[in-house]
Each structure stands twice: as structure tokens, then as C-alpha cells.
Image (cartoon, grey):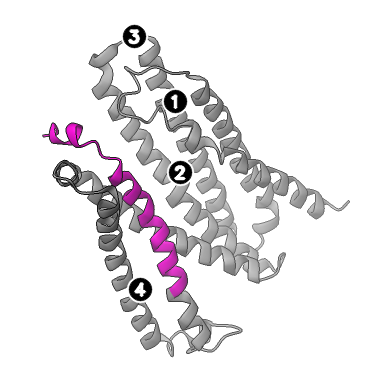
């Protein structure tokens, strides 16, 4: 087995191990709840999720270190940037774990209602760390590694291109989801009043979906029109397709629209779970 094959095998194993964190969101659903500190229930899921995320953090860094000798020939600065980005991602994951374990410690200490504000602040801090380490930094990783692999020709060129597409879609999801989640949070009291006055959960869901998709579709229309206008300028950067390929201009808006729908759906479901009594007590 050649050294290159060994390196690829090690990097592949590390990469596959990063998928052990898939159930983490489910495991952390309880500890991120506003009343977790004064509530009842086992803490074991949080500890299991913490172990899985530690594995992911270490394997993410291991992937970058294993690939560095291979991809540094295509661009040492980008290769170092990939290692640094992966290291930052792992650091934020570990910091998020410590934040959630601090919430568990508060509950085990029996601080009661006096620790609710602190617990909610820690949960909000974890949320920001999660968005950075689980959403934004992976986009940076995809762009850096995709450009290196595309240039090196170590893999079929379609794979790095798919990585670029995935990074763009992930960025779109983050933007739409973040905007709608913030909008739902700001309108909690309004939604509670609507539901207290008899609005059905389906009506609330449709309201949020309509608002989110209206913005998303407007962006898709503007983006498609801009891309069509700039097609001639981008012609030299394209391969395998024409600058005004009808299939591309038909598929991209559809994919972006479906992606936006998925990003809007979660805040819409969250809006239907608003407790009218609790929202009316909010200042």
C-alpha cells in the first residue's frame, strides 16, 4: 500500500467518524429547553452527546492533518487554512460541550428558578457556537478543500464541484433559517395573541411559511435574473455547460426554492408550538 493510499484511507476513516454526531441534536433537545434547570429528567443524553461531539472534534482535526501532506502541493496557504479552520471548528465544538455541561451542573446543584436566566444565557451561547461550528465553518472547509481537490485532480472533478454547490446551499439555508427563526422569536407575543384569539396551528404555520417563501422566492428571482445578465462575463469560468444553459437556469431556482422551503419549515413548526399563556406574559 502506497503512502498516498494510506493517507487517503486514514483521512477517509476520520471523515466517516465525523458522522457519529448525527443524533446530537436529538440528544441535546432537553438541555436546550428554557426550563431544563428546574425540570426533571435524565442527564445521560447530554453526556452521550458530549462524547460524540468530542469524537467529531478530534476526527475533524485529524482529517485536516491527514490530508495536509497531500493537498499542500496545490496551495500551502489554503492547506494551512483548512487545518486552521478544522481546528477552530473543533475548538468551538468543545467550548459548546462545556457550555451545555455547565447547564447540567447548575441543575444538579439544585439552584432552581434562580439559575433560569443563567441557564438560558448559556443555552443561547451554545446556539451561537453551534451555528458557527456546525454551519458557517463547514462552508469555509468545503470551499478550501474543494478548491484544493479540484486543482489536484485526486478525485473526479464533479465531487469538488458538488462540494461548492453544497456550500452555497448550506449558506442559503443558514441565511433563511436564521432570518425566519429570529422573526418567529420577535413575533412570539403576536403569535400567542393570534392563537389565544382562536387561530389554528395550521394558520400560524402557513403565515410563517408564506412570509419566508415570499422573501426566498424574491431572492431566487433577483439572483436568476442577475446570473442571466452576467452569464457572458462568467463564460470563461464554466466547463461542461453553456453560459445560458436552459437546464441550469431551470434547475437552480427549483433546487434553491426547495432548499428555502426546508429552511423555513422548522421555524414554522416552532411557531405552532408557542404557548399562548407563556407568550402573553413575555415583556
Q: Position of residue 1 (x, y in %)?
A: 88, 51
In 3D space, how far apart are the residues under numbered discs 4 and 2 (Cα atoms)? 27 Å
Q: Earlier in the sequence, mark 3 or mark 1?
A: 1
Q: Earlier in the sequence, mark 4 or mark 2?
A: 2
Q: Quadrant of residue 126?
A: top left
What residue would you read off at disc 3? Answer: 110
| Foreground pick, 261 / 182 | 261
User: Badges 4 and 3: C-beta atoms under 8 Å apart?
Assistant: no
Q: Secondary structure at mark 3?
A: loop
What residue would you read off at disc 1? Answer: 98
Q: Earlier in the sequence, mark 2 or mark 3?
A: 3
Q: Position of residue 130 (x, y in %)?
A: 42, 40
User: Badges 1 and 4: C-beta atoms under 8 Å apart?
Assistant: no
Using a 10 Å C-alpha cutoff, classify the residue at mark 2 as few (fewer than 14 neighbours), some (14 to 19) or many (20 or more). Answer: many
Q: Residue at x 53, y 30 (%)?
A: 49
Which region of the structure is painted magenta? 254-283
What residue would you read off at disc 2? Answer: 133
Residue 277 colored in magenta in the image: yes
Q: Quadrant of residue 124?
A: top left
Q: Secondary structure at mark 2?
A: helix
What residue would you read off at disc 4? Answer: 220
Q: Residue at x 61, y 33 (%)?
A: 55
User: Badges 4 and 2: C-beta atoms under 8 Å apart?
Assistant: no
Amino acid at each position: 500500500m502506497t503512502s498516498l493510499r494510506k493517507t487517503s484511507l486514514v483521512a477517509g476513516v476520520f471523515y466517516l467518524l465525523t458522522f457519529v454526531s448525527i443524533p446530537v441534536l436529538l440528544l441535546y433537545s432537553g438541555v436546550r429547553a428554557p426550563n431544563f434547570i428546574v425540570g426533571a429528567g435524565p442527564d445521560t443524553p447530554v453526556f452521550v452527546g458530549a462524547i460524540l461531539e468530542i469524537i467529531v472534534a478530534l476526527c475533524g482535526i485529524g482529517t485536516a492533518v491527514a490530508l495536509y501532506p497531500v493537498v499542500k502541493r496545490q496551495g500551502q496557504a489554503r492547506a494551512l487554512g483548512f487545518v486552521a479552520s478544522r481546528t477552530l471548528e473543533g475548538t468551538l465544538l468543545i467550548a459548546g460541550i462545556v457550555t451545555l455541561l455547565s447547564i447540567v451542573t447548575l441543575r444538579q446543584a439544585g439552584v432552581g428558578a434562580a439559575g433560569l436566566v443563567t441557564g438560558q444565557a448559556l443555552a443561547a451561547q451554545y446556539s451561537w457556537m453551534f451555528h458557527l461550528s456546525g454551519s458557517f465553518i463547514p462552508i469555509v472547509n468545503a470551499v478550501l478543500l474543494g478548491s484544493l481537490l479540484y486543482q489536484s485532480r485526486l478525485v473526479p472533478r464533479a465531487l469538488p464541484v458538488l462540494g461548492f454547490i453544497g456550500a452555497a446551499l448550506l449558506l442559503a439555508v443558514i441565511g433563511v433559517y436564521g432570518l425566519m427563526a429570529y422573526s418567529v422569536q420577535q413575533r412570539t407575543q403576536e403569535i400567542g395573541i393570534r392563537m389565544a384569539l382562536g387561530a389554528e396551528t395550521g394558520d400560524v404555520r402557513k403565515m410563517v411559511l408564506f412570509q419566508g417563501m415570499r422573501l426566498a422566492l424574491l431572492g431566487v428571482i433577483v439572483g436568476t435574473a442577475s446570473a442571466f445578465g452576467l452569464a457572458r462575463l462568467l463564460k470563461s469560468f464554466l466547463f461542461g455547460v453553456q453560459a445560458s444553459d436552459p437546464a441550469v437556469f431551470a434547475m437552480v431556482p427549483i433546487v434553491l426554492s426547495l432548499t428555502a422551503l426546508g429552511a423555513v419549515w422548522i421555524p414554522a413548526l416552532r411557531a405552532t408550538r408557542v404557548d399562548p399563556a407563556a407568550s402573553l406574559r413575555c415583556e
